[in-house]
Image (cartoon, rainbow, N blue to C red):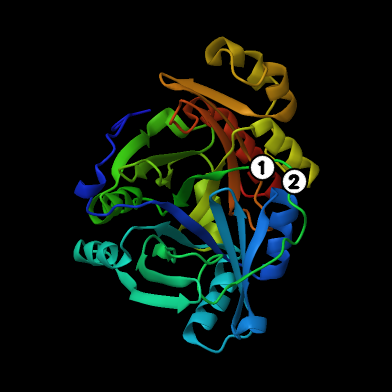
Amino acid sequence: MTEIQDHPTPTPRQDDPFPVKGMDAVVFAVGNAKQAAHYYSAAFGMKLAAYSGPENGSRETASYVLVNGSARFVFTSVVKASTERGKWLENHVATHGDGVTDLAMEVPDARAAYAHAVSMGATGLEEPYELTDEHGTVVLASIATYGETRHTLVDRSRYSGPYLPGYVEASPIVEPPARRTFQAIDHCVGNVELGKMNEWVGFYNKVLGFTNMKEFVGDDIATEYSALMSKVVADGTLKVKFPINEPAEGKKKSQIDEYLEFYGGPGVQHVALATNDIVNTVRTMRASGVEFLDVPGSYYDTLGEWVGDTRVPLDELRELKILADRDEDGYLLQIFTKPVQDRPTVFFEIIERHGSMGFGKGNFKALFEAIEREQDRRGNL
């Protein structure tokens, strides 16, 4: 692994041309938002917090907002397309299947953030505008990133409602588990075409002022059959982290190639969710029907020799198929779901960090071999 900048120095907010407060929401376009909301409530332990649909004035779309700690997912489906936006959403689902359309970021000043981004070369999708209701005012703006993904810039400093104006508070679909399954969004990973990774890393460097955090090239992410390259960009405070992947030459089709083929182009591959108790999270989610990638028992035979002691005993890591990795700053525990829809595209990572700000380099071979086994079962390797 090549460390571009192992510990980027946090940027003082007053000196940051594009300050961000954190991830505001991961927004999905789906075929059936009601069913998606039920799945993520029951299987991921999230809580329905807000709703927008025909019952409260949204005649074209239905949207469900689910939360877990600071993590917020929004699932939107088309009820009846009658505008350009509705037809775009309908076409997006038809082309890509269920997937992420928006990695929304909370910013202290959406107007200033949009102006800076556009001045540095970003493609503006929506100029700054206000939405107001009895809970206050939100300022929004949007810029384009890879594929059909966008970044909505959200200033909600003058708003106290459940999500945005136009949404009403909603009761939970199912009772959330007694303990949270996760607390926050750790990072969001994008897959882009061959030769495009550096272009998009440069976009985040120039347009948003993000720093290069990690770089994985060559044999870092490779197996006997496939390989990929990845670079990680992050904001000055490291609250928002975006790894960008592209395929690399290999004997067979890589997971990035498979994603690009079935998604129909670049997009968000997976979302990593931060937990402080990965054992409880995995047990709860697995009991609710979530499928995780399998890891051969041989992975754990030598794990203790190089990872050392972790909060979770080795036998329990083996039982639950949880991966572990250690670097100079500490260690992390992680596990990956299988794709959560029929297309082999979007999946999730659960991660518990203890000092390490890495991404599990020591696990890459085991992880990618597990993914290749699933690709082979689908006939896509």
Q: Considering depth in this image, is 201 or 196 the residue closer to the camera?
A: 201
Taking the image as shown, residue 342 lies to the left or right of residue 89, namely: right
Task: Name the residue carrying label 1.
Answer: 181
Please name the residue shown 32% across and 53% down the image: 200
Taking the image as shown, residue 18 lies to the left or right of residue 260, namely: left
Please name the residue shown 29% across and 68% down the image: 123
To which quarter of the image does residue 139 belong?
bottom left
Q: Distance between the residues labelled 1 and 2?
A: 8 Å
Contact? badges 1 and 2 (CB < 8 Å)? yes
Q: Considering depth in this image, is 49 or 87 the residue closer to the camera?
A: 49
Percent x, y of residue 298: 67, 19
Q: In this view, does 34 lie above or below 46?
A: below
Q: In this view, does 358 lie above or below 62?
A: above
Q: Which amino acid does label 1 sit on?
A: Thr
Furthest residue in direction top, as rendered: 305
Task: Name the residue carrying label 2.
Answer: 177
